[in-house]
Image: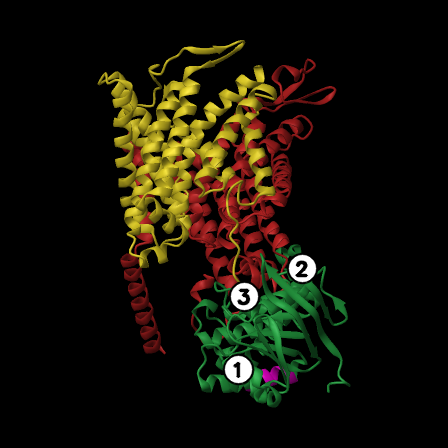
Amino acid sequence: MRTENTTGKTAISLFDAAHRGRTASFALVILLYAVLRAMQAGGGLSSLFTSLLVPVTCYIVAAIGLNLNVGVSGELNLGQAGFMSVGAFTAVCVSGRLAATLPVPALRLVIAIILGAAAAALFGFLIGIPVLKLQGDYLAIVTLAFGQIIKSLITNMYLGFDANGFQFSFVENKCKLEPGGKMLLNGPMGATGTERIATFTAGTVLIIAALFIVYNLIYSKSGRAIMAARDNRIAAELTGINISSTKMLSFVVSAGLAGSAGALYGLNYSTLVPNKFDFNTSILILVYVVLGGLGNMTGTIISTIVLVLLPELLRSLQDYRMLIYAVVLIMIMLLTNNEKVKTFFKTVRSRFVKTAAAGGKEAA
Amino acid sequence: MEFLSYLINGLGLGSVYAIIALGYTMVYGIAKMLNFAHGDVIMIGAYVAFFALTGLGLPLIPAVLLAMLVCTAMGVIIERLAYKPLRQASSLAVLITAIGVSYFLQNGAQLLWSSSTKVFPAVISSGFFSLGSLSISYLTLITIAVCILVMAGLTLFVNRTKTGSAMRACSEDKGAATLMGINVNFIISVTFAIGSGLAAIASVLLCSTYPSVFPTLGAMPGIKAFTAAVFGGIGSIPGAFLGGLLLGVIEILAKAYISTQLSDAIVFAVLIVVLLIKPAGLLGRKMSEKV
Amino acid sequence: MSGEKKLLLDVQGVGIDFGGLTAVQNLNLKVYEGEIVGLIGPNGAGKTTVFNMLTKVYQPSRGKIIFDGMDLEKKNIVETNRAGIARTFQNIRLFSGLSVLDNVMTGYHNSITYSPFAAVLRTPAFRRQERETEAKAKELLKIMELDQVMNVTAGNLPYGAQRRLEIARALATGPKLLLLDEPAAGMNPQETEELMRMIRLIRDSFGVSILLIEHDMKLVMGICERITVLNYGMRLAQGTPEEIQANPEVIKAYLGD
């Protein structure tokens, strides 16, 4: 989007640029929602695809957040699943605790998502303090480490509540509840018996909210500062930009979005194990971002959808599907970085633009 | 006495991490890439060794040599096919490709050998060495000895041979190395070959300690060893050695004295603290930017 | 000489060591308000190091830097900019992925007051400030003759335009002192001529003082009111362009023994 505006005599302000990218993403999301809803109503969606609707929206939101971090801010984050995990288990606990007192599921869902996002953002802030002192690959490894720590901690958490309030322990048999109490977290077993209140509509609204936040942030003072810090740290500092607070902003927003995504994900399943949000999940989301294009939110949405569906579409190939998935991944990286392929697409594009321009002139 | 035996067991586990970490650190030092598929090369080594020992009935040493041969070849082939075309690409593209290779190896292994766990035969003596109340398994002692041998051999290779000094030159400045007539592609291949060969050795030691062989067995040791490499200062060979040993010791001590379940959290927390104090790892060099 | 003018920058006995090596030794340098001062010297004399100390990229080992009545000792890089020092770089450092316009708008970072929340909610304050900033940035681009390329990605600009953009970005931060590190490097005589005119214009219309490092003697002698010559990290001479040109020590340093 932004980088495509390399030529042109008249000024395209930030607002115009923002509008273009934004319009495309929002239009895509709304269109997909309408089409899928229509297909669902007409019975055109298999149960498998229906079951994928909510998870796809979750991954999209987490990937949009990560793209702010990796694409816009330029920091490699290998722990996005950790923030999803914090959001997921917070939301599941909140929803479980409120189940009896607040019978309206939609309201509970909103509260759970907001608290899940807030908890993840808080974690992002706390983790950001040490993490953002580091640079490059060292920053990446620390986010990986934090992802592992979060997983390891949640795997060992036992949380329940009874008449005496919340009971919490890191040791299974120390978390004793009065009769009538309810376990919310069960160590490696995670959360069980969760009421499934997540919906595809909620997921779509969440994507739109995420896009709204991320685009508005990018096309503002903060976004310019984030990209300035990415492009040239020293020049940014000498332009009066505080690098730590700038990077912190993108890190916290990214974590918060991952938290909201996790929250929705957690409330979509009756059981959720902490192992769901491991290093592989972080990597998976990173793959969505890189294939979708750094800083390109529309691309992120498309690549997430394609890559979540790909293994399912390859289901007929049975055991070979993940192998083919891996090959596809490698081939895409090799092809998109191949000079010959790049030049080919450049020529095609410039020819297309020339033809379009010529056509435009003729019409005028 | 109890503490001493934990310490030695920690050094044993750390030795395995150190050998794997050498693969990460050498590749990073020269190709400047995080090779996330390295852990899966260990897995391949484990399967090859397993079949050599049980299927072919080979004795230990030939089985290890065969595993090394296969892993070395695989390392070089992977580099040629998947990483070499990306020399000029962004580090993220290389990272994602490495992840793709990792998926490929894991799923390939699952197809070829099924996901069910195979029990690695106890080929290294299961006896114990006793000294007063202290008792240590021979396996641990052998592991530590192998690690020291590998480390010494590698140090000699890097510092005393022509290829070794070419490797050091490449890690300093690839452009300048090329101008000096060094074949950088060849050096990168050698680096992958050595790292992968060492992964095969590590796989046999690892599977002798934890005797189960399955397609994702390399993932966790891979991440731990990568952590060890960063811990010691990624790119530094002595750093990988030190980082691996420390990581093993911390892990075993944390398991023994604090909590088995939380030992991973503790290991990674220590890594973070170390990086905050020494941002380039224990023996790493801080690169400063010229303004 | 500049008695009636206010002293803006006062460098007192500043020096810096790298390891055991002294890069700059006991440097004294004064810049008064509205002045254009040149800092010249052979390669490796420590000129850029002086800039790096003034902007706190490096912390001086000795001496004092007083800027606009403030001691800069405790200030970090960001704070020196906020105090009113802006600079360009010998090896150009633009925000290469941003457009020319956005590079300059980034320069206005600290004069924009809305919060990230206001940005997300697109409040009236946000809209007003963005509009104003954009207008100011475009004005500045016009002065620097970059208004024709304002939507070009900065990294794709030709060399001379990149140098001018760096100056525009530095000016956007609202400095009292502008440090230019070899602004004419890589420019042809015609471009250099144009640059000289621009530097004078900047001084006159923005009221900034300028301290510049330059190898192009035509430029230095043409626009600098005073010149300090650095050699081996030490001040070799100081004076008006005429005095410097006549100074035998300077000639010796440049031409060799």
Tell me the magenta residue range. C197-204
Left or right of C218: which side holds A332? left
Secondary structure under tag 1 reads helix
User: Of C152 and B153, which appears nearest the observer?
Assistant: B153
> Mark 3 — residue?
A14
Please tell me whether mark 3 or mark 1 is closer to you in this view.
1
A16 shown above or below B40: below
- Shown in yellow, the chain is B
> Mark 1 — residue?
C252
Q: Amino acid at mark 2?
A: Asn
Q: How many marks?
A: 3
Q: Colour of chain C?
A: green
Secondary structure under tag 3 reads helix
Residues tagged by mark 2 and mark 3 found on one chain of the structure: no
**Pointer 1 indicates a residue of which chain?**
C
Disc 3 to disc 1, how far (Cα)?
A: 54 Å
> Mark 2 — residue?
C76
In the image, which disc is placed on residue B151? none
Residues tagged by mark 3 and mark 1 found on one chain of the structure: no
